[in-house]
Amino acid sequence: MQNHPLKMAITKHIREHSSIYLFVFVLFLMGVIFGAVIVNSMTFSQKEDLYFYLNRFFGQVSEGKVATSNEMFQQSFLHNIKYLGLMWILGLSIIGLPVILIMLFLKGIVVGFSVGFLVNQMGWKGFLMSFVSVFPQNLLMIPAFLIMSTAGIAISLKIFKQLFMKKKNMKENPFQFFSRYAIVLGIIGIMILAASSLEAYASPGLMKSVMDVVIKK
């Protein structure tokens, strides 16, 4: 049986960039841990202020007073595609490589802080809330960030080698790897489209169900 070309391409890509994938995953994980640590370093008054706004938001969700699903989808998609699009552009410049790493680390902090704060303030109920409000979209969002970071780092390193290491024996011309880099952005766009759909159309309903069944008891 012949292997599917797409499957072969994905396998080859992961094999060639496995070390970069490992690096960006560890960096993202460090961001998540750092975000959770920030929660514990906050003062009592800061936690109380945030918890007040969080409770008000939960109340609005329960009463159906939040933005419409279409508005949430548009906001989520535009925010994330701009963020990842910037990472894509930065990958085309050598000096953008450290910025990509910083942006990935910040994404990890946001995820870690969100989950950490909910669990810190609400215990197991907070874990359930984070599971339905943070987990669904991030099931696609986090892989999208890891793939984009890896692709950006890889293309930046490749440009560096061509410019400064005088690798004249490289068989691949710039147009070829740029085309593949553009395809990566297209795949990322599809992933963000699906993640934003989950965040806008699935998460609010799941959050309301959890609040009605668990939080209000």
Image: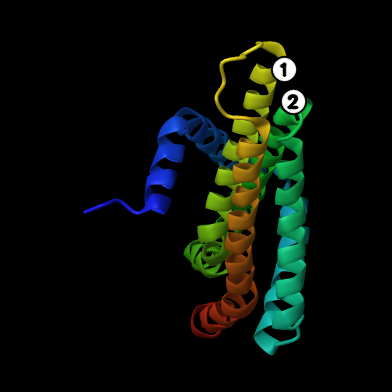
Q: Position of residue 165 (x, y in %)?
A: 65, 11
Q: Name the residue under label 1.
A: 163
Q: Position of residue 78 (x, y in %)?
A: 76, 63
- Residue at image coords 50%, 62%: 127
Q: Mark 2 points at which residue?
A: 94
- Residue at image coords 52%, 30%: 20
Identify the image's colour scheme: rainbow, by chain, secondary structure or one colour: rainbow
Q: What residue type is labelled 2?
A: Ile
Residue 186 in sight in this render: yes
Mark 2 neighbour density, 10 Å: few (under 14) some (14–19) many (20 or more): some
Q: In this view, does 177 lie above or below 211?
A: above
| C-alpha span from label 1 to label 2 | 10 Å
Q: What residue type is labelled 1?
A: Leu
Residue 39 in sight in this render: no
Q: In this view, does 3 lie to the left or right of 107?
A: left
Q: Where is residue 53 in the image (x, y as percent from the top left)?
A: 76, 67
